[in-house]
């Protein structure tokens, strides 16, 4: 037990102290970024125990197991392990699963019920769709599971669904009129198998408390003190449970930051924290406004951004830390230039470990040019919470097609694509092909091609499907003889209908996969543009695949090495780094083009930007590109409105040095400059003159978008055949064709 003088309270600032010593009645702690929220929660629990509150009567709810573990360890060190174990502390799902096991018989389950994870749920839903003979291309398993999950998190039962004409009509309009029946069958099958899914852990707890007053009274009496972390992330179902449990004693303390509510796509409702004071009598609000993480410039910049939101709880975050460097905003000619500038900045940082650096982006697809540039500059990196670009499933699927086109003996790639997208060639058929190939000492490809002559036991329909597959590959092989890597890949994606396949998954993950395929095309376009510069190079598919193989090999090196962290802005929440780069600050990208429909959507994008800014401790670098490829077509970009919302006194704007469009920047015939008619674009587009020449001479110092700084060694040839040998500081000598070279004098 803690000593009587409560010396632990000396660790707190005044605002933290006031929040901690408020033990009875409802309270809300609005905790600005980096303000010590976890400390307040931890110390408040310790303070309750130290003031004779029985640990058995304390319920503490978190959103992650990591947060729960950290709090338990800290509390255990302060009040002793024995007492700390008596506190009901954990995630919403783990705590409510515990309650449901105690009370399972009340809702028709036994206490040893199984909890289905996402994969289990999807398998069951897939079986139901198949049994009902529904079109699996319309009734996509993931889409239906997401729909059911959303219904449950909003506490909409099967009965509630069928009585809500708006929900039923919505599913009819999306050509899924059987959604309600799938939901009904799914729930019945769960009950029959004595199982619950993750969403049931919340929904069944709600049902238990609503339908059994004795159970509600029991847990209201048990949990006299309730604490909730990250309250801004609660969904409707979580809100209702907390409200029910706390209704009797109202000794509830919620901690959160409305400015960091960024999970509406998961069902989080920012109004839970905004309206908390209306749910209880005499709510006391504590504002933790002192930031211990960031410099004054970073804190003030974040404040100036979030001030543009209307739906918020007022607070003014401040810090006693130094002013620090101004936030750097850099404009770049292209996303490649943005990635190169980022790498130059990283290599220029002094007394810094790579692990002190994070690169944040709005969508996963944006990692591709950054990864390429980091590899080129031999900067080790890791994708936080994901896999590197070329190792993502949808990318590996497309690359497998390309590899088979180049090398039909590549059996692993062939096995990967033979039934993707599904074309009715199952595992039994593939096994027969493998056995026959071994028997006749042939490749899988040749075995399929000659399966009739080899008298393999296939049905007529399977034989036709195999023949169609071979014909598809053979046509693409012929196309490969005349197309460059970009045009051929686009042909593959179109002919195989990969995008149509990915569109069937309407979840955020499905959209992300489509964006990744788009970014693969952009990467191939970049590869072709680079190859044009280099003397005696080629832009064929084989050369591109060699480049990719070297890229993926880079990912396997030095797994324990100090690395730069790459991640989406959503994944960065709760983390901190000395140096933070936020890239792609352009309209349509960040804020997302999908966020323009309502003020609430746009305000969530702004909160996401606020989260990104407040990850930085010492330095923050923001950047955007004036142009980038989308589906292999070059478009001009407009800088994000969010950049203009930062007060100018906190920023330093950096424009590209010695910006002169190189000849390779001129519009090519096969590039279409397009923009959405309802969105603004840069009015100051570069004006090109077809007669412009690049005047460089031997001895000149030059800058290249990809290779950086160098010196011209010699110039050879004339006109379109003129080429320069340039000795680059980091990449050695390169022979470049001047009509394509991205060179500027420095």
Image (cartoon, rainbow, N blue to C red):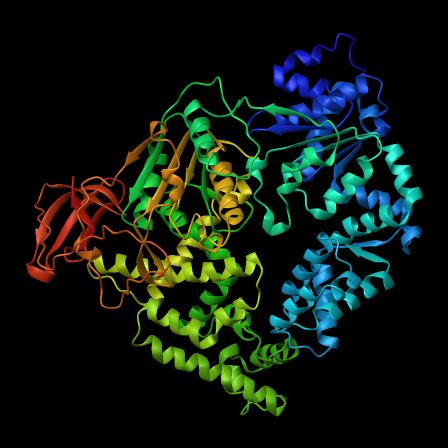
- Compared to residue 34, the image places residue 335 above or below, namely below
Viewed as shown, does residue 158 lie left or right of 167? Answer: right
Residue 236 in sight from this viewpoint: yes
- Compared to residue 622, the image places residue 52 above or below, namely above
- At 63% across and 67% down in the image, what residue appears? 170
Task: Choose top left, top right, bottom left or bottom right for residue 287.
Answer: top right
Q: Nearer the viewer, residue 516 or 472?
A: 516
Residue 562 in sight from this viewpoint: no
Image coordinates of residue 577 in percent, x first then y, are 49, 32
Image coordinates of residue 339 in percent, x first then y, are 35, 45
Task: Choose top left, top right, bottom left or bottom right for residue 313.
Answer: top right
Q: Nearer the viewer, residue 376 or 339?
A: 339
Q: Which of 360 and 386 is in front in this view?
A: 360
- Compared to residue 609, the image places residue 549 above or below, namely below
Viewed as shown, does residue 255 lie left or right of 615? Answer: right
**Quadrant of the frame with the N terminus:** top right
Image coordinates of residue 434 in percent, x first then y, are 59, 77
**Quadrant of the frame with the C terminus:** top left
- Which residue is most to the top? 5
Image coordinates of residue 537 in percent, x first then y, are 24, 61
């Amino acid at each position: 037990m803690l000593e009587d003088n409560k010396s632990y309270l000396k660790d707190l600032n005044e605002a933290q102290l006031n929040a901690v010593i408020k033990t009875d009645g409802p309270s809300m702690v609005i905790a600005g970024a980096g303000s010590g929220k976890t400390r307040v929660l931890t110390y408040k629990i310790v303070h309750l125990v130290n003031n004779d509150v029985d640990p058995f009567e304390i319920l503490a709810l978190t959103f992650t197991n990591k947060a729960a573990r950290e709090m338990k360890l800290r509390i255990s060190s302060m009040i002793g392990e024995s007492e700390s174990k008596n506190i009901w502390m954990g995630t919403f799902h783990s705590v409510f699963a515990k309650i449901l096991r105690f009370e399972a018989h009340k809702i028709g389950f036994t206490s040893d019920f199984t909890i289905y994870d996402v994969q289990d749920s999807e398998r069951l839903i897939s079986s139901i769709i198949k049994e009902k003979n529904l079109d699996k291309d319309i009734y996509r398993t993931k889409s239906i599971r997401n729909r059911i999950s959303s219904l449950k998190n909003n506490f909409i039962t099967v009965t509630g669904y069928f009585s809500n004409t708006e929900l039923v009509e919505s599913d009819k309009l999306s050509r899924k009129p059987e959604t309600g029946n799938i939901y009904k069958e799914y729930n019945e099958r769960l009950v029959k198998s004595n199982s619950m899914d993750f969403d049931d852990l919340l929904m069944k707890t709600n049902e238990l408390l609503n339908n059994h007053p004795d159970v509600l009274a029991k847990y209201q009496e048990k949990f006299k003190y309730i604490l909730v972390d990250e309250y801004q992330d609660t969904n409707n179902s979580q809100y209702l449970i907390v409200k029910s449990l706390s209704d009797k004693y109202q000794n509830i303390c919620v901690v959160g930051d409305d400015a960091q509510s960024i999970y509406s796509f998961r069902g989080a409702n920012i109004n839970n924290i905004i309206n908390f004071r209306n749910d209880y009598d005499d709510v006391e609000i504590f504002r933790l406004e002192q930031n211990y993480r960031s410099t004054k410039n970073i804190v003030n910049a974040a404040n100036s951004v979030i001030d543009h939101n209307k739906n918020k709880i007022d607070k003014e975050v401040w810090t006693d830390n130094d002013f620090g460097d101004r936030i750097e905003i850099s404009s770049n000619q292209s996303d490649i230039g943005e990635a190169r500038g980022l790498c130059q900045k990283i290599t220029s940082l002094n007394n810094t470990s790579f692990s002190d650096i994070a690169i944040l982006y709005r969508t996963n697809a944006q990692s591709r040019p950054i990864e390429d540039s980091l590899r080129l500059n031999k900067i080790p990196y890791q994708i936080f919470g994901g896999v590197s670009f070329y190792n993502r499933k949808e990318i590996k699927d497309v690359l497998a097609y390309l590899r088979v086109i180049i090398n039909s003996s590549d059996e692993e790639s062939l096995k990967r694509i033979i039934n993707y997208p599904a074309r009715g060639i199952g595992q039994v058929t593939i096994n027969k092909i493998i056995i026959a190939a071994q028997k006749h000492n042939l490749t899988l490809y040749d075995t399929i091609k000659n399966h009739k002559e080899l008298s393999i036991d296939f049905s007529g329909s399977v034989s036709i499907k195999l023949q169609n597959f071979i014909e598809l590959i053979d046509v693409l092989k012929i196309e490969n003889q005349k197309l460059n890597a970009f045009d051929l890949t686009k042909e593959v994606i179109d002919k195989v209908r990969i995008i149509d396949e990915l569109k069937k998954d309407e979840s955020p993950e499905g959209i992300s996969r489509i964006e990744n395929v788009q970014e693969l095309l952009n990467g191939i376009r970049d590869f072709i543009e680079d190859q044009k510069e280099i003397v005696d190079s080629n832009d064929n598919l084989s050369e591109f695949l060699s480049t990719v193989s070297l890229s993926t090999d880079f990912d396997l090196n030095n797994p324990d090495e100090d690395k730069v962290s790459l991640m989406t802005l959503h994944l960065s929440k709760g983390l901190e780094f000395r140096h933070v780069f936020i890239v792609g600050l352009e309209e349509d990208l960040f804020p997302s083009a999908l966020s323009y429909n309502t003020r609430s959507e746009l305000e969530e994008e702004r909160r996401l930007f606020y989260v990104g800014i407040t990850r930085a401790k010492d330095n923050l670098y923001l950047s955007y590109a004036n142009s980038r490829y989308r589906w292999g077509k070059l478009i001009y970009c407009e800088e994000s409105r969010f950049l203009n919302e930062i007060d100018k006194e906190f920023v330093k704007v950096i424009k590209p040095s010695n910006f002169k469009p190189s000849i390779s920047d001129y519009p090519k015939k096969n590039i279409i400059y397009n923009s959405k008619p309802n969105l603004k674009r840069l009015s100051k587009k570069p004006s090109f003159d077809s007669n412009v020449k690049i005047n460089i001479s031997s001895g000149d110092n030059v800058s290249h978008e990809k290779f950086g700084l160098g010196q011209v060694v010699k110039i050879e040839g004339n006109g379109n055949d003129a080429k320069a040998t340039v000795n680059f500081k980091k990449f050695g000598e390169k022979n470049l064709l001047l009509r394509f070279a991205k060179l500027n004098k420095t």
